[in-house]
Amino acid sequence: MSRYEDIRYEVDGHVGVLTLDRPDVHNALRRRTYDELTEVVRTTTARVLVITGAGRSFCSGDDVRELMGGGEASSAPRPAPRLTPAAGALLGSDVPVIAAVNGPAVGWGMELALMADLRVAARRARFGELFVKRGLCSDVAGIARLAQLVGRERAAELLFTGEVIDAERAERIGLVGRVVDDEQLLPAALELAGRIAANPPLAVAALKRGLRRALDPDWSELGEWVSTTLGELFATEDHREGVRSFLEKREPHYVGR
């Protein structure tokens, strides 16, 4: 039985399954969700971790009302610039992570999918880096990992436009490794996880460390830049307008300040 409130976590053999469990808000992430996600990733003893979402959404990103203040200006002090703890846990883990993307993965939901080593998508999955629509920049994975997967030009288009793409296009451009029928998503992800978990765990962990050494930027440095930049963007009128227009279900009017 899971002891968490916002997620479910179960281990079967050597495979752990972490399910974001706030389907009523499309698995939006609040502070508790981030904390629970971080704890599981850091403490799991599984050889492979599968991350998915409850209901028909993978993750709709940050809970706009809690984490973005509903579009109201905030004078609350901001923490010192740093890599997001959940991102640090995922990007620094030696445990292979598979994202089983069962529906829309937007905002930090897409970041979460990008931080996985492998992505299996249901046909109903959708992907979108929506940060620009809220007057913000993406987290580290949207800047670095996305370009690794799809190339700089396609990454720039997705980041600059905030376009949401379907699973078939995501597969064509290399964002996901495979697309399966909706009802086959978890079986496909678990089958892949099982094949990885059957291999020598020390060798698999070493291979993951090797991929980090060969391909990844300095995540801590990039995370400090992202958090500093977000702190500046959170204070803009355009950010507040992006959030308010989303909540009020209307077209935004940006002013460049």
Image (cartoon, helix red, strand yellow):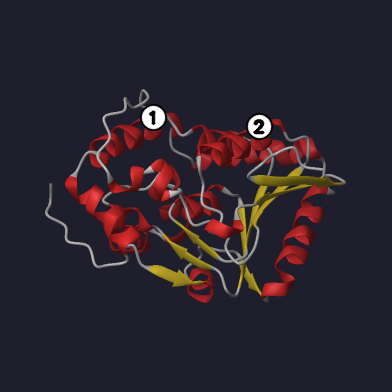
The residue singled out by tag 2 in the image is 42
The answer to whether marks 2 and 1 mark residues whose Cβ atoms lie closer than 8 Å is no
The residue singled out by tag 1 in the image is 221
Query: How many marks do you count on the picture?
Result: 2
Q: Looking at the picture, tell me which residue is in the foreground, 58 or 158.
A: 58
Above/below status of 216 relative to 26? above
* Label 2 crowd (10 A; few <14 / some 14-19 / many >=20): some
Q: Looking at the picture, tell me which residue is in the foreground, 192 or 250.
A: 250
Which of the two discs, 2 and 1, labels the residue nearer the N terminus? 2
The percent coordinates of residue 182 (x first, y second) are 67, 74
Q: Looking at the picture, tell me which residue is in the foreground, 150 or 12.
A: 12
Which element is circle 1 on? helix
On the picture, is 178 further left or further right than 234? right
Of the 4 image quadrants, the one containing the N terminus is: top right
Above/below status of 232 relative to 100? above
On the picture, is 85 further left or further right than 4? left
Q: Alpha-carbon distance for marks 2 and 1?
A: 20 Å
The percent coordinates of residue 89 (x first, y second) are 58, 34
| Residue 197 in view (yes/no) | yes
On the picture, is 145 further left or further right than 98? left
The percent coordinates of residue 117 (x first, y second) are 61, 50
Question: The disc labelled 1 sits on which kind of residue?
Answer: Glu
Question: The disc labelled 2 sits on which kind of residue?
Answer: Arg
Above/below status of 247 relative to 226? below
The percent coordinates of residue 256 (x first, y second) are 12, 51
What residue is drawn where x is 34% and y is 48%? 70
What residue is drawn where x is 68% and y is 76%? 181
Q: Extreme right residue here?
A: 13
Nearer to us: label 2 or label 1: 2
